[in-house]
Amino acid sequence: MVKEYRIGVIPGDGTGPEVVAEGIKVLNAAGSRYGFSLSYTNYDIGGERYKRTGEILPNSVLDELKSQQALFLGAIGHPDVAPGILEKGILLRTRFELDQYINLRPVKLYAGVETPLKNKGPEDIDFVVVRENTEGLYTGSGGFLKKGTADEVAVQESINTRKGAERCIRFAFDYTRSRNKAKKLTLCGKTNVLTYAFDLWERTFYEVAGDYPTVQTDYAHVDATCMWMVKNPEWFDVIVTDNMFGDIITDLGAMIQGGMGIACGGNINPQGVSMFEPIGGSAPKYTGKNMINPLAAILAGSMMLEFLGEKPAAQGIESGVERALRDNLKSVEAGRMGMGTKEVGDLIAAYVLGS
């Protein structure tokens, strides 16, 4: 009997439905080639639903998401909805409610993709950022005093727990060991200024390190991390950090790997339901033009299959992307690829099928 996986699909806003369609096209090709199937349930969540009904993420939908084996997200963000409403109401709530406490972001430069870094190539840019995903400054803890007056005070608190830091750090050590490259894990923080939060992180990091004698450890302040990501990205294998710093350095990582059109990520609950997505946002100006690059969504599908245990299929998708970048595509920028969104999906699907 063919194994079937239940996948919840959130196409979302803007070009999200377009890249999701190509991701599903490639996922289905992988299933056909490697002997499994995927059953999709689509969820109408995003800006248009909010404008139409005032609903962001109904509890009934959230309960259904919890019943899936994985989630595949296109993009969230609508030009007619104020920033923060959808992001907090959908993305952050999903991460918190499903306890997706790891944000996993590969930073990998593929052959055929240009990087803005001089004299750097694919052999230099290949590392992973493990970002804590449910604590820190993103918990929404804080508030206003005397809002709207000259004496207004705004407080935003960073919440860091031993449990939250340790489970993130342990995931990072396990991932570093299984990645089997340099086997080096770097803690990124700011111990010289954020002396409470990163004292907790640093103590936990080196205590946990004792359980992983084969993994080399080091530490870098977040500002130094940004500097070395630009100057010497080859120094990094895996980086672990908190929610805010991880959010920042992964966008820098996306740029050095060639841009948002190639960057993907996973919101991971190792024991539960995880969500996989392209990083580039909804890009509303390209909606319906068959111009947007679907490779990030396709690679997010590859990450999803690896998480589900279908590693040969995941590698087959990544190999198809690598072949297309090497032999077919002129650029990873929207409108400059040399073919349309649907045609890129067709090409990768054909490569996955062995055509």
Image: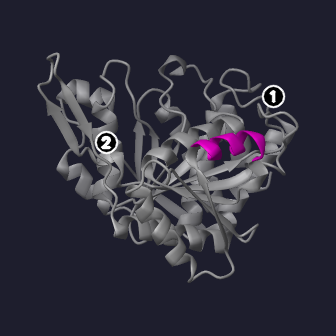
- Is 204 situated above or below 353? below
Residue pointed to by mark 2? 90
Q: Position of residue 217 (x, y in %)?
A: 65, 68
Gap in Å between the C-alphas at discs 1 and 2?
Answer: 35 Å
Residue pointed to by mark 1? 330
Whether residue 21 appears in this view of the structure is no
Main SS, magenta region, reads helix
Residue extent of the magenta highlight: 223-232
Instruction: Describe the element under mark 2 as helix, strand or loop.
Output: helix
Extreme-left residue of the structure = 146
- Is 79 situated above or below 252? above
The residue at 17%/16% (across/down) is: 150
Towards the viewer: 122 or 78 = 122
The three-letter code of the residue at mark 1 reads Lys
- Is 93 situated above or below 307? above
The residue at 76%/55% (across/down) is: 235
Q: Residues within 10 Å of mark 1 (few under 14, many from 20)?
A: some
The three-letter code of the residue at mark 2 reads Ile
Q: Residues within 10 Å of mark 2 (few under 14, many from 20)?
A: some
Left or right of 319? Residue 196 is: left
Q: How many marks?
A: 2
The residue at 51%/77% (across/down) is: 208
Q: Position of residue 309 (x, y in %)?
A: 57, 71
- Is 35 situated above or below 338? below
Which badge, 1 or 2, comes first in the chain's sequence?
2
